[in-house]
Image: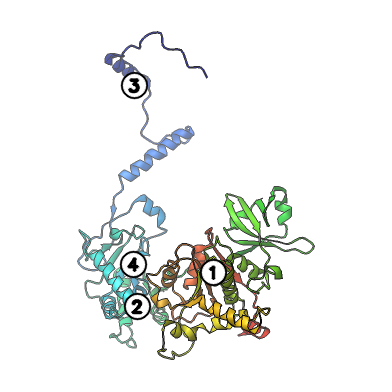
Amino acid sequence: MPLPPAPAKRADRLALEKITQSQAKERQTKAPVPRSRPPADSAPTAGLQGKLDTRTFDLQTATVVPSMPIAGNSGTKPRNVSPVQRKRSSGPAKLFVLDTNVLLHDPICLFRFEEHDIFLPMIVLEELDGHKKGMTEVARNARQTSRTLDALAASPGCDITKGLALNTTGHTDARGKLLFQTEPLNYTLPASLPIGKADNQILGVVEALRHKLPEREVVLVSKDINMRVKARALGLNTDDYKNDKTLEDGDLLYSGALALPTDFWASHGQAVESWQQGPHTFYKVDGPIVPDMYINQFVYFEAPGEPSLYARVTEIRGTTAVLRTLKDFNHLKNAVWGVTARNREQNFAMNLLTDPEVDFVTLTGTAGTGKTLMALAAGLTQVLDDRRYTEIIVTRATVSVGEDIGFLPGTEEEKMGPWMGALDDNLEVLGKTENSAGEWGRAATNELVRSRIKIKSMNFMRGRTFLNKYVIIDEAQNLTPKQMKTLVTRAGPGTKIVCMGNLAQIDTPYLTEGSSGLTFAVDKFKGWPHGGHITLARGERSRLADFASEVL
């Protein structure tokens, strides 16, 4: 492209007087902009300008909204309420009275109530002080709660009689205030409830606050079912602390598999693109079913008289998804350490366990669905045959079903021996799959397998880093979310972690299907490109075990 010709003469400098005269002429020719909102029949752009001016005026004229005092001297509790906060709140701020067990269960629960206020009776602080000694998780939570309260009370400019702002320590989601019982409260309880019991004193505080603040909704939050029942019997508002629950209903848990509708090819077949890459076939689909998919989710199509499709979602962009067909582990030629998949879900699980790009696998299912057997078989193949990992590390939650049998002698591995009966049973099954080497060959193989499997206790996991290890966490349904985080964050480069469990067999006290660490991990890792989950549906252990799982 040729350059433009050079200027014929040098540019003149514009005088300041000319600039001033031109600006004055422009101001005279322009019409004044009205400050008030334009009429309804004006142009759309003018209406938008009026809305913007009004919104700016509201922000500038926002005032401090007073509220009623809770405890201490009479006065107002200033609280800055912006229009953004009014949009986020769905009603007037409530006053939640927390029971001690809520603080001991979740030490950061003070910051989980958004714009609502929190009230702590004096007896709750006394009970916190009584639980702070020891090395248990309850004692650690009590100490952490005490440190949190101390940090809030040490904030500059705070007044404990008017309440402590919960967002002063960096928790911006907590927009309410923390209030303490700073004066005696008058209340009357039935004679059948002794005053000296801590639970009854908390109920009395809730009763007194309800009469002291009739314009506010006072709610007791407790993990104690019996205390909630007594509160309802007294006519008090009460609720469970549900922030620790990932799901309210276990049936809503992500299953890892999605059945394609019977009219899938009829509704999506025109826009499907397919290509071959190695042993896999890829399908690029676009349609209304794509928003329901997650990365690494399995999809299957089964219809009489039509070819079946079993694939995994590898990519999602908007309303377009890429599906990749699976390796068929139902066939004997693709057996893993002599083990083949017996149903559709087991085939899905084998594809996750043998994929080096998947670092975190969760398997759930009833007893006898083959979780431990498949995880061990895939681990032995990748450690001994493929040499992808250096060794297998097996751990589990040591929660007994019945009474504790006491202390166990020996080393760490010997102490974990009685808890690893399932490991020994599955190794015995895997040792019988190879019959070509004879008795001596099987003995040598078993010795080699045992040397590559290390049994570790969860109590000594903190601070460790696993490099190129294949980690199996069995009975993961008995872990809390905090314990699950501790174990998963031990993974270093080249490590694969497999978590297995049956959510119907939780033995840890105070844990449910909704608050289990396994449920927490499944829900948080769904859709991650390097994680996968599958729920095994059909048991393959024996007809007796299958029938017992259904009827008992």
Horizontal and vertical percent position of residue 71? 24, 68
Quadrant containing the C terminus is bottom right
In-image side of 97 versus 362 (left or right): left
Q: Quadrant of residue 422?
A: bottom right
- Amino acid, disc 3: Arg
- Is label 2 in contact with label 3 (beta carbons under 8 Å)? no
The tag earlier along the polypeptide, 4 or 3, is: 3
Residue 21 in the image: state x and y as whole percent: 30, 15
Three-letter code for the amino acid on which mark 1 is drawn: Thr
Is residue 204 left or right of 281 when viewed as pictured? left
The numbered mark, 4 or 1, whose residue comes first in the sequence reads: 4
Q: Secondary structure at mark 3?
A: helix
- Calculate the distance from the C-alpha at mark 2 to the C-alpha at mark 4: 16 Å
Farthest residue, direction top? 8
How is the model colour-coded? rainbow
**Disc 2 target residue:** 138
Nearer to me, 461 or 139: 461
Q: Nearer the viewer, mark 1 or mark 2?
A: 1
Q: Residue 119: give x, y in percent of width and height.
A: 30, 69
Q: For the point 37% across and 35% down, which residue is it? A: 36
Callout 4 secondary element = helix
Disc 1 to disc 2: CB gap under 8 Å: no
Residue matched to label 1: 362
Q: Secondary structure at mark 1?
A: strand
Residue 110 marker: 4
